[in-house]
Image (cartoon, rainbow, N blue to C red):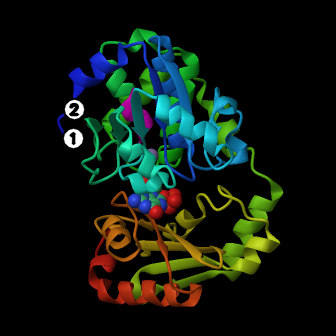
Amino acid sequence: MMKPDLDLFRSGTAMPVQSVVLAHRNPDGDALGSSLAWAQYLRARGQSVTVILPSEFPQHMSWMPGAKDILIFDNFPDEGREAISLAEQIYALDFNSWERVDPLQHQLLESSATKYLVDHHLDPEPYFDAYYSDSSACSTAELIYRLIEDMDQLDKMDRVMAENLYVGMLTDTGSFRYTISAEVFRVASGLLAKGVDPGYIQNKVFNTQSRKHLELLGHCLANRMRIFPELGTGVIYLNLDDHRKFKIQRGDTEGIVNYILSLNKINLAALITQQNKQYIKLSLRSKGDFSVQKLASQHFNGGGHKNASGGRSDLSLEDTMKKIVELAHTHKSEILNSF
Ligand code: 5GP
Ligand code: MN
């Protein structure tokens, strides 16, 4: 862990100022859960807080406590700009580069507000005034809990805050399967002690999918999966027609890439989705030592974590597929021996 700027967080959070809490584009359960919980904490300390997300969150997360008050910048850009211009403090959560909050990045960089980062991604950018950053944490939600604990403020955490944090931990660990440590279970246990009902949250998050979602999964596995056993690699791709046919929205493809890794001796998995003519999004996952964070940052303008990263490609779907297979060839022995 980078040495945390605890004193700055302690003094900053004790000021009754206007602040903005901000997470990344295409927000997931961790972006949402950590932002909502942190906003609630700041309000309990007397701050006036606006939570801003650059783009919509998945519909099935709208039950989360406080989700309805989030300002979606894509839908309300003027209100978003105004909140940022009035903010004296900006808390960036669950992302490490301003590029992840496009199109707000210029205004954020120019803002004179004090900027705080709480995040668990590798290689945070050096544009923040205070850091609480640890890439060994399973989620930003875990870090929010630890930060509040480090500031001796756990008594301010109620059940609702704990529920939001639990969602972040649950989703970023894929139901406590990935990036597990003793610390993860210690923090999760602290959240349960605050009154979280794990069965209730599990149901809300994972058992509320639509029939379309299951059909899309079936289509991916039956018709869109390519496995390269000699490279320890698997790829699923979705083209423009698939997007139209299944009316794919953000969140609908969440988790699909992980199915590839359930295959024996497959250590690298990619999901390539062509969302529109110009934009191809990649989700990369690995088992063991092979770092998809390096692959994403060096070849796909992206990043994330060693075993879970994302990025984008300017090539066609077909050429993106070829590029992944070529990269798998180049790194064949590392991939095969990764796990
Ligand atoms: P996912 O594949 O689920 O979209 O993302 C996996 C991880 O990679 C997440 O931690 C996410 O924040 C990160 N990530 C996804 N897309 C990008 C990207 O375009 N740039 C960067 N820097 N990180 C990304
Ligand atoms: Mn996260």
What secondary structure prevails in the magenta region?
helix
Is 133 rendered above or below residue 277?
above
Residue type indicated by callout 2? Pro
**Residue receiving disc 2:** 4
CA distance for labels 2 and 1 = 8 Å
Is 235 rendered above or below residue 23?
below
Residue type indicated by callout 1? Met
Q: Quadrant of the C terminus?
A: bottom left
Horizontal and vertical percent for residue 170?
Answer: 52, 40
Horizontal and vertical percent for residue 146?
Answer: 33, 27
The image quarter containing residue 236 is bottom right
For marks 2 and 1, give the one nearer the viewer: 2
**How many marks are shown on the rendered structure?**
2
Secondary structure type for disc 1: loop
Horizontal and vertical percent for residue 75?
Answer: 69, 47
Horizontal and vertical percent for residue 10?
Answer: 28, 18
User: Which residue is drawn at the image coordinates 36% and 33% (left, top)?
Assistant: 143
* Residue 170 seen: no
- State the extent of the magenta-drawn residues as a range: 139-144
As drawn, the label of residue 1 is 1
* Residue 157 seen: yes
Decide whether residue 174 is among the magenta residues: no
Which residue is more in the foreground, 106 or 47?
A: 106
Mark 2 residue crowding within 10 angstroms, few (<14) / some (14–19) / many (20+): some
Contact between marks 2 and 1 (CB within 8 A): the answer is yes
